[in-house]
Image: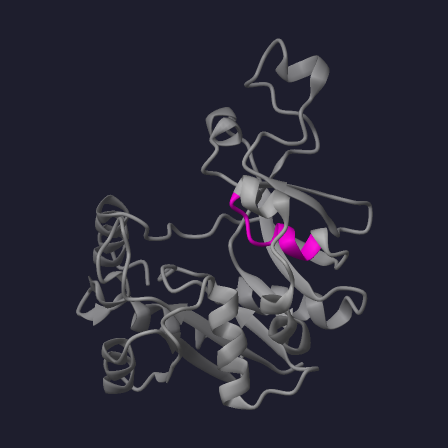
Amino acid sequence: MSFTVLIPARLASTRLPRKPLADIAGLPMIVRVAERAARSGARRVAVAADDPEIVASCEAHGVTALLTRRDHATGSDRLAEACELLGLDDADIVVNVQGDEPLIDAGLIDACAALLARSTDCVASTPAHAIDDAAEFLNPNVVKLVCDAAGRALYFSRAPIPWWRDGYATKVDALASPRPLRHIGLYAYRTGFLKRFPTLPASPLETLESLEQLRILWHGYRIAVHVSDARPGPGVDTPEDLARVRAVWSEGAR
């Protein structure tokens, strides 16, 4: 199996300005993400950036980077352009690793790519892990998902799904079995579909939930789900998140 890792990076960030270039133990965060991704079985790792400063920073540390347009609405749109710039074949598999995941598990990248390679009925794959905390289950910032019997995604939501009518209604901390699933924001795509994705009209559900992956389901495509036993390391959205990740690095958890 052969696949490419692409990491979208945008310099502007409301909650953490210049996030891709934030220092983590002496290197920009985007470089740390690329280093982790390079531990996977990917034949190539590249950053798809919206600013020459990110490209220069990556290249200074030996990371391949592509300059893409600034006006892309989503990270998937940016990756679609990157696929064209790299001349990837429509049958190739691309794994989208978020640029704010400096502790991403390389094994998770490999697992998603492998799952998509053998799931010929799907255009994408994504990971999830079981939720065992009621506060997490009820948190709208935690994206939940439900699957069918074949492990294909049925729906993603910020709401607590599936809702155990006879359990949660009386005791919300008594989570059902099987456990609800928390979505992990990593995707493997078939390149042909990724190129097509920006041309698909946005879904009303996507707009309501603010979840881009619902566009895929809305238009009748399938997403395979890899359920992981392990939780991913913390991502970086805020200055507090950055401090947390820096602390992990200072403890030697690299």
- Colouring of the image: one colour
**Residue 217 appears in view:** yes
Locate the C terminus and report the quarter of the image it occupies: bottom left
Locate the N terminus and report the quarter of the image it occupies: bottom right
**Residue 40 appears in view:** no
> Residue 88's quadrant in the figure?
bottom right
Image x and y of residue 31, in percent: 30, 73
Q: Is residue 75 above or below residue 134?
A: below
- Which of the pair 187/53 is nearer the observer? 53
Image x and y of residue 60, in percent: 23, 86
Range of the magenta residues?
Answer: 210-217
- Which of the pair 88/72 is nearer the observer? 72
In the rendered image, residue 224 lying in the magenta stretch gets the answer: no
The answer to whether residue 86 is left or right of residue 190 is: left
Residue projecting furthest to the bottom: 87
In the rendered image, residue 215 lying in the magenta stretch gets the answer: yes
- Which of the pair 252/239 is nearer the observer? 239
Image x and y of residue 51, in percent: 29, 75
Image x and y of residue 217, in percent: 71, 53
The residue depicted at 63 percent of the width and 12 percent of the height is 169
The residue depicted at 56 percent of the width and 90 percent of the height is 87
How many tags in the picture? 0
The residue depicted at 63 percent of the width and 35 percent of the height is 180
Q: Is residue 93 above or below residue 112?
A: below
Q: Is residue 27 above or below residue 175?
A: below
